[in-house]
Amino acid sequence: MSRSEELRNNGVVKYEGEVPQTDVATGERSTRNRVARSILDHGPSTVADLAKRLGLTQAAVRRHLDALAADDVVQAKEQRVYGARTRGRPAKVFALTDCGRDAFDQSYDKLAADALTWISRAAGGGEQGEAAVTAFARARIAAQAHAYREAVEAAPPEQRTEALARALSADGYAATARSAPVGEQLCQHHCPVAHVAEQFPQLCEAETEVFSALLGTHVQRLATIAHGDGVCTTYIPKTAHSASASTAGRNPA
C-alpha cells in the first residue's frame, strides 16, 4: 500500500476478542493517519496538542510521529513565537512535509482529469476527442523523455533498461529493472498519474511508446497500476546486439 493510499484510508474497524496481528497493524496505520490528518486540519502541532485532540497518550503520539517522520510525512520544527518570548526553549511542533501534504491532496488528480475531459470535448468528442488526448499525452511524456534519453544513451547497451529505471525513479516512479527468461522487465512500483490514467489510458500508451523509442526495440506493457495491478510492468525482449548505440541489444542485466 502506498503512503498516499494509507493516509487516505482513515476508517477504524473494531473487533471483539483477540485481534489478529494484521489487524493490529491496520489499527496502527489508522491511528497514524489520524495524527497526520489532525496536523493537516490544525496546522503545526505539539505532541500535547495532538494527544488532547485525538484522545491519545503523549507517548503514543510520539511513537506515531517518529514513524511518520521516518516516512517523510512530518517534520519537527521550532514553534514560532509571536510577541515577547517567555523563558525556556520553544516547544517543538510537527508539520507536514510536502510529501505528506501531497498524499492528502487529490485535487490535482481531479483538475487533470477535468482538463483532459475538456480537451476531448473541445476537439469534438468521439475519435477526434481521443486523438486530442493522445496528442496531449505524447507531448507530456516527450517533455519528460529528454532526461530519460540522456540517461539511456549514456549507459552501455546491456545496462540501458537499468538506466531508464533510475531516471524514472528520479521522477517518482520507484522503478526497477530485472532479468526475465528472454529479456528484461521494467517495473514501476508507483505511478503519480495512476488515478487520471484510469480514465485516460492514452497516458500509459504514450509512455509505452516512449520506452520503445528510448530502448530501440518493441516493448510490451504487461500490467498497469491504473488498471488495478500492483505494479506497472513493461517487457523488453532480448534482441541481437547492434553496432549502433541507438539500436543496442537488450541483454538481461
Image (tube, rainbow, N blue to C red):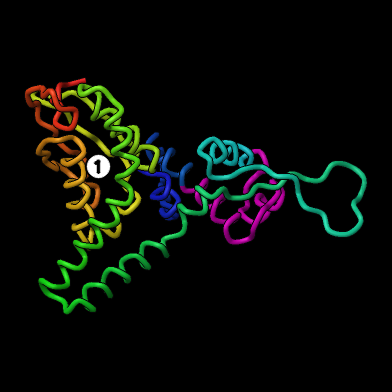
- Residue 66 position within the rendered picture, expressed as x and y whole percent measured from the top left: 59, 36
Q: Is residue 76 left or right of residue 89?
A: left
Choose between 39 and 249: the one closer to the eye. Answer: 249
In the rendered structure, the answer to whether residue 63 lies left or right of residue 87 reads left
Residue 169 appears left or right of 100: left
- Residue 165 higher or lower than 49, as above or below: above
- Where is residue 132 drawn, in percent x and y? 19, 68
What secondary structure is the stretch in magenta mostly built from? helix
| Disc 1 element | loop
Which quadrant holds residue 213?
A: top left
Q: Which residue is mark 1?
A: 230
Q: Which residues are magenta?
A: 30-59
Looking at the picture, tell me which residue is in the foreground, 236 or 34: 236
Q: Is residue 2 above or below residue 166?
A: below
User: What residue sits 20% from the left and 76% below the top?
Assistant: 123
Q: Looking at the figure, which quarter contains the C terminus?
A: top left
Q: Is residue 227 magenta?
A: no
Choose between 139 and 25: the one closer to the eye: 139
Looking at the rendered structure, the kind of residue marked 1 is Gly
Q: Residue at x 63, y 60 (%)?
A: 42
Q: Position of residue 91 (x, y in %)?
A: 78, 45
Question: Residue lying furthest front in this view?
Answer: 244
Q: Nearer the viewer, residue 174 or 49?
A: 174
Q: What percent of the width, then of the height, locates residue 236? A: 14, 33
